[in-house]
Amino acid sequence: MKMYKIICFFLALFALPSLSSFAQAGKKADKDMKNWRYEIEGVAEGKEGTYVVKIWTYSKKPKIAIEQAKKNAVHAIVFQGFVGSGRVSGQPPLASSPGIEQEKADFFKSFFADGGSYMKYISVSNDGSIDPDDMLNVGKEYKIGVVVSVRKEMLKKDLIAAGIIQSLNNGF
């Protein structure tokens, strides 16, 4: 019985630091999300109602950056839009009101939560594999480019239905 307690003690001693590192990684991802540190560029004209964009996300851990890129892509389409380049035309943000993110903070907190509603509007074009040219070491963190397809029309329709943004037909 005494040996059992000693073994349990050592297992706990070694297991707790690894468990806390998982919790810290989650906290880091949440912190990165709250800062919304990303860059967006149009990559190609997608199928009707979709945008294909490359999201450059910053993080100390590449896996966190890849997952965060999905949230960042939807965030950029809703609040930032993107500038055109080459054959890809620029697009304005879906939300025209600059304060809507703060006004509807409860909605967006659950919308962008891990596994939240934002997931139904995206697909990662490169299956999560990153081109070596799209993984840059910037100081003590990585800047990682992920190509994402965003279902803009579906997102817009659902945000209108939820009362987050207004339809263009509203007021005519």
Image (cartoon, grey):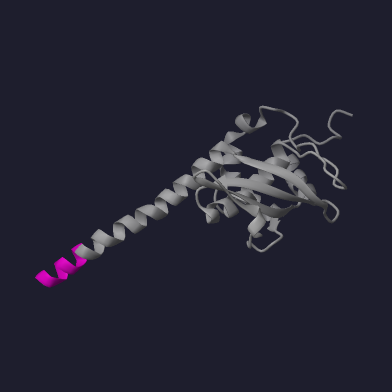
> Image check: 171 left or right of 39?
right
Point out residue 23 in the picture as x, y percentages from the top left corner: 40, 51
> Image check: 47 left or right of 128?
right
In the picture, which quadrant includes the C terminus? top right
Q: Nearer the viewer, residue 160 or 143?
A: 143
Point out residue 21 in the picture as x, y percentages from the top left corner: 38, 53
Point out residue 4 in the picture as x, y percentages from the top left corner: 16, 71
In the picture, which quadrant includes the N terminus? bottom left
24 part of magenta stretch: no
Q: Residue at x 68, y 48 (%)?
A: 55
> Image check: 121 left or right of 48?
left
Tell me the chief SS of the magenta region: helix
Point out residue 96 in the picture as x, y percentages from the top left corner: 75, 31
Position of 135 relative to 80 (above/below): below
Q: Residue 13 appears in which quarter of the rendering?
A: bottom left
Position of 170 relative to 22 (above/below): above
Q: Residue at x 80, y 48 (%)?
A: 153
Task: Tell me which segment is drawn in magenta.
Answer: 2-9
3 part of magenta stretch: yes
* Res. 119 visible in picture: no
* Res. 133 visible in picture: yes
> Image check: 148 left or right of 109?
right
Q: Residue at x 35, y 58 (%)?
A: 18
